[in-house]
């Protein structure tokens, strides 16, 4: 086995979303109820009375947390109990324990929070003289993105709503048009979602894509600002985005009941964790390709709006950020010299971001670099001179469409069938992985497969969590043990 990446200086703090739970107690939730215009243009259908032109209103979480709505006591939900009436406490559950509620507080200078890198320190390098609470790039993911547009930042009412963090409307869409209709659900529910702008998060693929909007990135569209964690922000100290939809969702205090919301009857669903993982990976690929397309387009904008090309955040950080010499005491040797790391990529060419199994991954046999779904993007970007922006924009657009088609296909299939397709990618020897990104994605994929077999024992979960901590600490000995624990049948 040739496992070593101790020489890679990467931060994987983003792998552990549960860490933010400790910050929830530090937030101060505003109590004001405010309405602010936040338009989301949509094409009006011929029979919805012009609903496509509605001025979507952000009303804030106060419109959701009434005791008769979603503000009932959350004790059962926080203890993992689910039932037909769990919706009554969904808001309370979010407010009590969901890390998204603390998202805005991370942008403030709260002395009670013990963080190695604060927003103030990041902004001092990224945008000197500007506060994170006044920067659209920060607000777009740390609050409701509809309230992060430049023209709304000075608005006092919008600020009150932004202080609520990534609250209900950040995920479900501004509630002005759907607040009343969703309490009755008369007629075609899917049509109500479409006509009012409520996001259909009951669809696993749409939910994964909504999460990826912040945890991967998204172009400016539908009235929302661009969400782009670029190399400048990472260099200033912001943690890399390391997203795994299945892992992140599993870590959340579940404030929802999985069910088919297009049906009038109560129809609970027990999701297959392997399907959740695979759909999440495809949605990640789709979001990454859309962002690449947008980055390429913006790099050809007029001078004052032009962005760098290529954007370094597109590539594997370890290809540049590593030590040039390996200490003699290094247990596993130089991972960069392993055959699995280079594959058939030209020497000296940095690898495009790993989104396995939609791309190849170092040390994992399937898929091959020139056989993956995103092969056109990979081959265009992994050349001595990456593709010019216009060419990259074209291949990224095509790859995003292919990913979207596959996402919708997987959502429509039974969980067991999707699980079978996912399992075909996994190697027999799960430990022969030479670098962090491949190891991270393989580890979470293996965990999803094990969860798909049934609820793991407490001991197994404890070993699995030790692997998550090992990524944070870059402790490969502990990670090896965690991998082995997952593979034990």
Image (cartoon, helix red, strand yellow):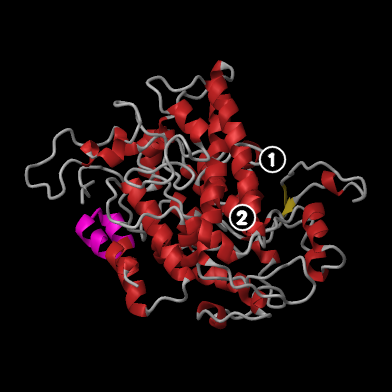
Residue at x-position 39% and y-position 44%: 240
Q: Around disc 2, counting alpha carbons within 10 Å, would you say few (fewer than 14), some (14 to 19), or many (20 or more)?
A: many
Which one is in front, 215 or 390?
390
Q: Give the percent coordinates (x, y) of residue 381.
A: 45, 28
Q: Which residue is mark 1?
A: 223
Image quarter of the C terminus: bottom left
What kind of element bears circle 1?
Answer: loop
Q: Is residue 69 left or right of residue 184?
A: left
Q: Residue at x 44, y 47 (%)?
A: 356
- The span shown in magenta is 468-482
**Residue farthest to the left?**
328
**Sequence-earlier tag: 1 or 2:** 1
Q: Is residue 369 magenta?
A: no
How far across and how far down the image is residue 409, in percent? 65, 52
Residue beneath label 2, please? 410
User: Magenta segment, principal secondary structure?
Assistant: helix
Residue 194 x/y as whole percent: 79, 53
């Amino acid at each position: 086995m040739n496992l070593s990446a101790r020489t890679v200086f990467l931060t994987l703090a983003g792998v552990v979303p549960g860490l933010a739970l400790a910050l929830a107690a530090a937030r101060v939730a505003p109590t004001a109820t405010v309405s602010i215009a936040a338009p989301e243009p949509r094409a009006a259908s011929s029979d919805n009375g012009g609903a496509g032109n509605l001025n979507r209103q952000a009303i804030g979480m106060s419109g959701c947390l009434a005791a008769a709505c979603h503000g009932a006591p959350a004790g059962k939900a926080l203890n993992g109990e689910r039932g037909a009436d769990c919706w009554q406490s969904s808001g309370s559950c979010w407010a009590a324990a969901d890390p998204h509620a603390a998202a805005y507080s991370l942008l403030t200078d709260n002395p009670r929070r013990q963080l190695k890198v604060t927003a103030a320190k990041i902004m001092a390098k990224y945008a000197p003289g500007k506060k994170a609470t006044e920067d659209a790039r920060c607000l777009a993911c740390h609050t409701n993105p509809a309230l992060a547009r430049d023209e709304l930042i000075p608005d006092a009412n919008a600020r009150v709503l932004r202080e609520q963090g990534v609250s209900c409307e950040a995920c479900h869409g501004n509630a002005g048009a759907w607040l009343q209709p969703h309490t009755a659900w008369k007629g075609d529910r899917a049509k109500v979602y479409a006509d009012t702008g409520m996001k259909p998060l009951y669809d696993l693929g749409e939910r994964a894509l909504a999460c990826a909007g912040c945890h991967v990135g998204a172009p400016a569209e539908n009235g929302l600002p661009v969400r782009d964690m670029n190399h400048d922000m990472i260099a200033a100290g912001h943690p890399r985005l390391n997203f795994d939809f299945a892992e992140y969702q599993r870590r959340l205090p579940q404030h929802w009941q999985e069910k088919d919301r297009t049906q009038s009857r109560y129809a609970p669903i027990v999701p297959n964790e392997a399907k959740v993982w695979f759909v999440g990976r495809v949605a990640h690929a789709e979001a990454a390709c859309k962002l690449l397309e947008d980055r390429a387009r913006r790099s050809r904008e007029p001078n004052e709006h032009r962005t760098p090309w290529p954007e370094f955040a597109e590539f594997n950080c370890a290809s540049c950020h590593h030590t040039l010499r390996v200490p003699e005491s290094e247990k596993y040797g130089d991972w960069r010299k392993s055959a699995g790391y280079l594959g058939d990529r030209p020497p000296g060419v940095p690898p495009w971001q790993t989104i396995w199994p939609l791309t190849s991954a170092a040390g994992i046999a399937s898929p091959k670099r020139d056989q993956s779904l995103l092969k056109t993007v990979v081959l265009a970007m992994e050349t001595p001179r990456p593709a010019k922006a216009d060419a990259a924009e074209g291949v990224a657009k095509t790859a995003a469409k292919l990913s979207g088609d596959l996402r919708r296909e997987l959502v429509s299939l039974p969980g067991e069938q999707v699980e079978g397709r996912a399992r075909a990618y996994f190697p027999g020897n799960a430990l022969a992985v030479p670098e962090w990104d491949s190891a991270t994605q393989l580890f979470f994929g293996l965990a999803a497969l094990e969860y798909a077999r049934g609820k793991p024992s407490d001991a197994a979960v404890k070993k699995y969590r030790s692997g998550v901590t090992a990524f944070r600490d870059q402790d490969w000995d502990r990670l090896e043990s965690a991998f082995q624990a997952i593979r034990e049948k």
